[in-house]
Amino acid sequence: MQYYSTNQQAPKADLKEAVVRGLAPDKGLYMPEQLPVFSSAFFEQLHNLSLQEIGAEVAKCFFGDSVDNKALKQIAEETLNFEIPLVKLSEQIFSLELFHGPTCAFKDVGGRFMARMLAYFTQNEQQDIYVLTATSGDTGSAVASGFFNVPGIKVIILYPKGKVSHIQEQQLTTHGHNITALEVDGTFDDCQKLVKEAFNTEGLRKKLKLTSANSINLARFLPQAIYYYHAVAQLGKTDKKIVFSVPSGNFGNLTAGIFAWNSGLPVHKFIAATNVNDIVPQYLETGIFSPKHSIKTLANAMDVGNPSNFVRMLEIFEHQHDKMAEMVKGFSLDDEGIQKYMQLIYEKHQYIADPHGAIGYAALDQQLQENEVGIFLETAHPAKFIDITEKVLQREVPIPERLGAYLKKKKEAVPLKADFNAFQDYLYSIS
């Protein structure tokens, strides 16, 4: 399989180059030349497969011509060593709980998979690889956990000062060893811009071997497709049309779901569920994509004003607005609505949803039709946003032991201005 750049100005790359580079030389995102498609036999047996078995089959379909099948199976088994249960809230609405991994967020799947794949591709390299990643909260913690103490790999995480939850910040800043956190005086979009500029600076690329662990990297976002298949497998046979509501920020998660649908997974439609940073819902309504500065909200992991993976969505739908708008519906919710739905979900179902999951549920509550069954992605444990969750619900939210352990550690972060020269000077100083 070869991979091309969405900007169409760079040579095609094999999987190793695409994963190690992260971003194409022309600043585009890598896409596979052919979108993978499963045989009907796979879907006929899907309901009988475990999460790890599904993971191995999906990895083989997506990456099997570039990675040894035995290695892929091991990567899938190590990545997916926790549950991803589908929880029934009503006859029509289900929650796919993606917070049972080590950092209690959906990005554990992509972060852990990428760490192992990068280690596979670089096991004989002599030069250290620097993994740069921008985070609005959960990406950084999953990447830090996934890459912690991986030989030959150093991780630098940029996060916006004062714009992540306390627990998220502790997860980002307390690992040490090969993990460094940079506390940027700006927004997530500023952090993402710094990372992209670093990749496109020739001097830095010559000095340091750089890659990214954001969802711009194929090995980070594509494995997220695995839990869409697993959700359908757990749902079982149904005569209703399946709708996935996906809380969305940088849109890697939704793009992975669209890949799964394109491979043959029986999905009727997706809902791109956002907070007031509603750039994609606006596009779906008007056909105009208009990035803007992100706005801080209670669902901070979705505070993105220029989502990177939108270009991949355009590629899949052949840059045709009507095609995308037919399959993907838009939805947005402000902070008042987020709090309202957090309360409603608890009162109606005795279920505690985090702010992001509440948006996903709200989209189904308002858009689901009678002949449809909806699955919203509960992307993080509510304890990761404990201040807002306890305030809204007026009740104590238990903190999982694996999260509580981070609160006992000392924060270590390097302050950084949202200025590329300052970031570049820092990178040169550590090389």
Image: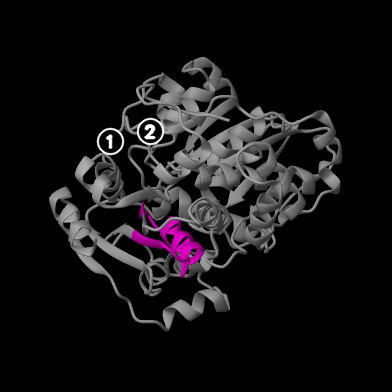
Q: Nearer the viewer, residue 79 or 19?
A: 19
Task: Where is residue 211? Give x, y as percent.
Answer: 38, 48
Magenta segment, which residues?
A: 131-156
Amino acid type assigned to the residue bearing label 2 in the image: Ile
Task: Where is residue 67? Give x, y as percent.
Answer: 62, 44
Q: Residue at x 41, y 42 (%)?
A: 22
Q: According to the image, label 1 marks what residue? A: 292
The image's colour scheme reads: one colour
Mark number, residue 72: none
Q: Secondary structure at mark 1?
A: loop
Task: Where is residue 112? Give x, y as percent.
Answer: 55, 58
Q: Residue at x 81, y 36 (%)?
A: 42
Q: Nearer the viewer, residue 201 or 311?
A: 201
Mark number, residue 279: 2
Quadrant (top left/top right/bottom left/bottom right) for the C terminus: bottom left
Can residue 88 be seen? no
Residue sitting farthest toward the bottom: 408
When the figure is inspected, residue 168 is found, relative to residue 263, above or below; the finding is below
Horizontal relation, residue 393 to residue 75: left or right: left
Task: Where is residue 323? Give x, y as percent.
Answer: 55, 17
Q: Is residue 151 magenta?
A: yes
